Image: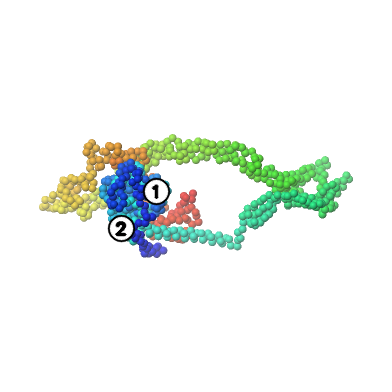
Amino acid sequence: MGLKLFIFLGLFCVTSVLGFGVDPALCINVFDELTLGEGFDGVTQVQGFHSESRAFHFQGSSREVKAPEDVSERMLQKLRGRREFTVVVTLKQEHFNSGVILSIHHSEQRFLELESSGQRSEVRLHYRTKGQKAHTEVFPYSLADGQWHKVSVAVSASHIILHVDCNRIYERVVEIPFMDIPEDTTFWLGQRSSAHGFFKGVMQDVQILVMPQGFISQCPDLNRTCPTCNDFHGLVQKIMELQDILAKTSSKLSRAEEMMNGLDGCYCERTCSVKGVIYREDESLTDGCRNCTCTNGTVQCETISCPPPQCPADTTPAYVKGACCMECQPVCHFGEEELVEGDQKAVHYNSGRCQLSECRERTMHRVVMTSPCPELNCPESEEVTLTDRCCKVCRGHDFCAEGHGCVENSDCINLEAGACCSCKDGFRPLRDDNAYCEDIDECAEGKHYCRENTMCVNTPGSFMCVCHTGYIRIDDYCCTEHDECVSGLHSCAQNALCFNTVGGHSCSCKPGYTGNGTICKAMCDGLCQNGGTCISPNNCICQLGFTGKSCETDIDECFHGFVECDDKAICVNLPGWYHCECRDGYHDNGLFSTNGESCIDINECKTGRNTCANDTVCFNLEGGYDCRCPHGRNCTGDCIHDNKVKHNGQIWVLDNDRCSVCSCQTGRVMCRRMVCDCENPTADLFCCPECDPRLSSQCLHQNGLLTYGSGESWVENCQQCQCLQGQVDCWPLLCPHVDCEFTVVPEGECCARCVTDPCQADTIRNNITKTCMDGHGIQRFSGSSWVKHSTECTLCQCKNGHICCSVDPMCL
């Protein structure tokens, strides 16, 4: 399958842009969207590179060119979710200015920011990766030279191209930018915020084109009709999605087959069970004094309403076993009494003889006793004569045990000469013999005793008084306020104070902590610098490589002898780090060993990296070279520098770096940085920023609480920052080179380290030829992810042939 994919991709080609005309729906014209020139201080319209569109001069540091919320949302709607876009601008930036061309950020998260640093001669593209990590791509190039430049940065999935003046300067493969931009994201032009990153110079034609190869709108001669990197990534992504759909469909089919096999021969009808009898859907039944229906597996009942019976002559209303309402029954006359079918009557004579009669078919019939009466074990005074039987019983006889008609929520009660029904507590009779009873809703009828801070809830035969939220029970009927603070059932943070309130509680951070009470963070005077973390009031935990109360001091690993570099390398201290850098005259052989063992000699004579004049001969030395005069000649000792002859002993300042002083010494050029003497009033403040005492040259830290003097440096969010004459310039910290397949950036650190376990890595060199086989037997590309078979929350990912699974935090 992999071979077919690559053959298909090799044949695939699309026309990305057929001409340099741009569809307005694909173009974000920033000047037009912001209606620039209307009410923005520090921005004035000037003559541009050409006269076909407006140009604006950005100056000063008190401006605030920020898009209104509705305008920002309208622009970002075109960019949101895109994997292919181009930022184009024509600009003329002031010498040595470091400023932001445009910035799209949410809080401290930069989703897209283009920056030009004149201090370090760099173009920087800041964005967030798919893994929600900040990334900065640095292109060494100077735009801040006071000249007009056409600049475009084209992004196509993992492919970035930088064009300057229609020349392709850089082309790189990077981590794919993540453009799922939140709705309340801000859009700035010519600055990062109201306090930082001020661009100084003129800008024209600032646009974002959401299309492939958008740079051709600026340089039509570069028009191409080839597939872009995004096209390739799109095809790979579609294949991954199809693989995932296939896996999910296979899983669903497998489960469906299992269910169907279990359902063979089954008729799935929901039934109801009442007193051991099964009733089908919509089947009706009578349960005592209720008419019921089986509906969707649940019995739903209504109380039967009994109308007064209208009985004809020689009949009388009477209850019949199994029926709720009275029915008309034929009567028998026994003296002055009326008896119904089945009633018995005993006549006791003084002689001791007894005659028992029963009402049958409207006539009293004599009942012949077939067995004698049982012998009683009680005194004669305790014997009771009954009217419905000839045999006497002892006082306290259990008539209920002989059988009774007390049915629903009714109890049988023994009397002296018989039994009767009585409704249970909390129930009322549905008929006058109390054989059937219904529940009394004490809550609805106000027959409860629930008091303050409670809610009455009806139960069969009774009720409950439930405490309101935030209250605790005193007795069955009363509740009082629940003190969550005392019981510990509160949501306050460990470093917060809990205050009990009516029906709840409130939280407030303790002194020395800040937050909303449920989350409290420690505060440190001056804050923790260089990425340190404040763990308790005025107590900072520093990142590796820093020390001090506020982590303000960099540990110089080189000075303290923590590092031992090879003799061909020199230890170079970095903020929070160090590395062994090859000495002058040496370069790395490509192995990048940490201690400098991979440094080898540069043959300056063969490579042409020497400055010997034509009258001398270059002679390579270990770590350097020598310009030797042939025997019998009189050599001048001059040097060749930038294709110009410099005389022996001559001293000059570099054309492209006024802070470096060079000299010619017997054919060899020696350069060094200018020595700063702050006591000298004529000191060059650009080369010696530390000598600048002006308040206007100070800089404000990103947190807005610290100030730095010109020339001072600090570390913030894994960036090296420097203040130069009132302008802050930040660039990614220099990290040692790591040449391995799997890397991870440990928590609290800025530089990647090699790991052997791919499942611990947060960055891998994806190799599409190294695939994985998932639980469905489907081949997965490296970088693809899926939900593990027969689970819902286990997410698996293919990392260069290795399957790594973990619980998806979104499921928790």
Q: Which residue is mark 2?
A: 220
User: Could you say which is closer to the camera, residue 656 or residue 430?
Assistant: 430
Question: Is residue 137 among what the camera can see?
Answer: no
The scheme the figure's colours follow is rainbow
Q: Is residue 403 left or right of residue 479?
A: right
**In the figure, residue 685 lies in which quadrant?**
top left
Task: Name the residue rendered at 47%, 37% in the picture.
Answer: 508
Label 1 – label 2 distance at C-alpha: 30 Å
User: Could you say which is closer to the camera, residue 148 or residue 170?
Assistant: 148
Question: Is residue 437 among what the camera can see?
Answer: yes
Residue 71 disc label: 1
Q: Is residue 67 left or right of residue 268?
A: left
Q: Secondary structure at mark 2?
A: helix
Number of labelled discs? 2
Q: Position of residue 138 (x, y in %)?
A: 32, 50
Query: Which label's residue is closer to the chain start, 1 or 2?
Result: 1
User: Could you say which is closer to the camera, residue 196 or residue 387?
Assistant: 196
What's the amino acid at mark 1?
Answer: Val
| Quadrant of the drawing holding the N terminus | bottom left
Q: Is residue 343 left or right of residue 663?
A: right
Vertical comparison of 202 with 770: above or below: above
Q: Position of residue 501 (x, y in %)?
A: 52, 36
Q: Secondary structure at mark 1?
A: helix
What's the amino acid at mark 2?
Answer: Pro
Task: Name the residue rendered at 45%, 41% in the picture.
Answer: 519
Vertical comparison of 131 with 254: above or below: above
User: Could you say which is closer to the camera, residue 182 or residue 529?
Assistant: 182
Residue 198 disc label: none
Task: Name the residue rendered at 73%, 52% in the picture.
Answer: 322
Q: Nearer the viewer, mark 1 or mark 2?
A: 1
Q: Position of residue 375 (x, y in %)?
A: 82, 46
